[in-house]
Image (spheres, rainbow, N blue to C red):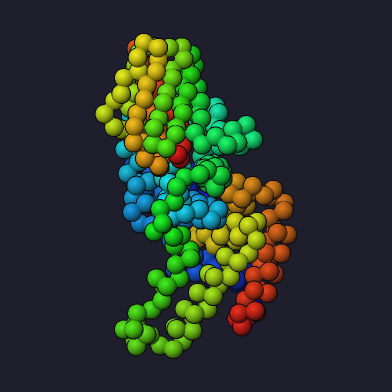
Amino acid sequence: MERAEIGELFTAAADGDSAAWKGLVEGLAPLVWSIARSYRLSDADARDVFATTWFKLVQHLGRIREPDKVGAWLASTARHEALKMARSVRPVPLDDHPALLDLSSAAPTPEEVVVEAERQEAAMARARVLWQVVRELSDTCQRLVRVLMTSPPPSYAEISAATGLAVGSIGPIRARCFGRLRTLLAEQGVA
Amino acid sequence: MTDDELEAELQEVAAMFDPPPVDLVQVAVDAFALHNLDGELAALAFDSLDEPELVRGQDARLLTFTAPGLTIEVELDGGRLLGQLLPPQEAEIVVNGRPPVRADDLGRFAADEVAAGSLSLRCELAGRTVVTEWLTV
């Protein structure tokens, strides 16, 4: 989604256009979700942070002065909610494992294995290793990298709002985190 | 492989393993219907989770919302919610769209079994409606 489009969608939504709101949610949901995930919250907490962030944007529809910055507003709101959840002492149900850890659910079924070409299996295995090593990064790196994994890619202002990192430090930290990621990949025998 | 290529691959991996849950995206889409229900907004002015050093050892979550001429104090302990309107006044309080509870003439109100999740209070006061900013509890 183009950033200019976000501003237009927000303005239309603030005027009551529900289709524009839907477009806005669908365009920015991956960013908001990535932030909830980047704080290693439980599934339930990540879901609540996501929902609260959007409910709050609805409350602020008529109050945001710079529609182009609504992505950064959402990112900042989600980060703030996620930080508080990370600090709170909500009881976590025993069956509530973060899906991030649940790699088994992505494993192919026997039928799929038969059907899938070997090349696809290799690609899947590689994707699984990538997903796993991201979780082995430091907190700072994981927060940044999880947000960078958002598609469509967030703007620098949004990354900054999502991570709390100054815009100027995002580039150098990204380079360092990706370097660490390559080391971890190499240890797993993945180029 | 450059960093940009690695990033592009990571984006595909996240979309594959951890996309925003479809039902949750629908919740956000549906939330638009709430925008016409808005009253005056009471902003979050204090949250004990923002001040861990002040409330260390205390399990209850203390929240203060303010709107012009009105303060709403909330204490959440487990699923128990205790509230206080200042200045004290009678009102109907709707917690997350549930049947309203009554604030007495001292401005006190209570609600039980407030589930973990997103929370907003809608306060029907004499002549005005005030809603608190959403937050996660």
> Would you place residue A3 above or below residue B50 in this image?
below
Q: Residue B26, position in %: x, y?
A: 33, 50
> In the figure, residue B55 lies in which quadrant?
top right
Residue found at x 54% / y 62%: A149
> Would you place residue B71 above or below residue B46 in this image?
above
> In the figure, residue B130 lies in which quadrant?
top left
Say whether residue A14 is visible.
Answer: no
Q: In this view, does A125 lie to the left or right of B92?
A: right
Q: In this view, does B136 lie to the left or right of A130?
A: left
Q: Residue A94, position in %: x, y?
A: 41, 57
Residue found at x 58% / y 49%: A162
Say whether residue A39 is visible.
Answer: yes
**In front: A81, or B82?**
B82
**In front: B48, or A180?**
B48
Q: In this view, does B113 lie to the left or right of B19?
A: left
Residue found at x 51% / y 30%: B62
**In front: B6, or B133?**
B133
Q: Residue furthest left?
A: B99
Q: Residue A29, position in %: x, y?
A: 44, 52
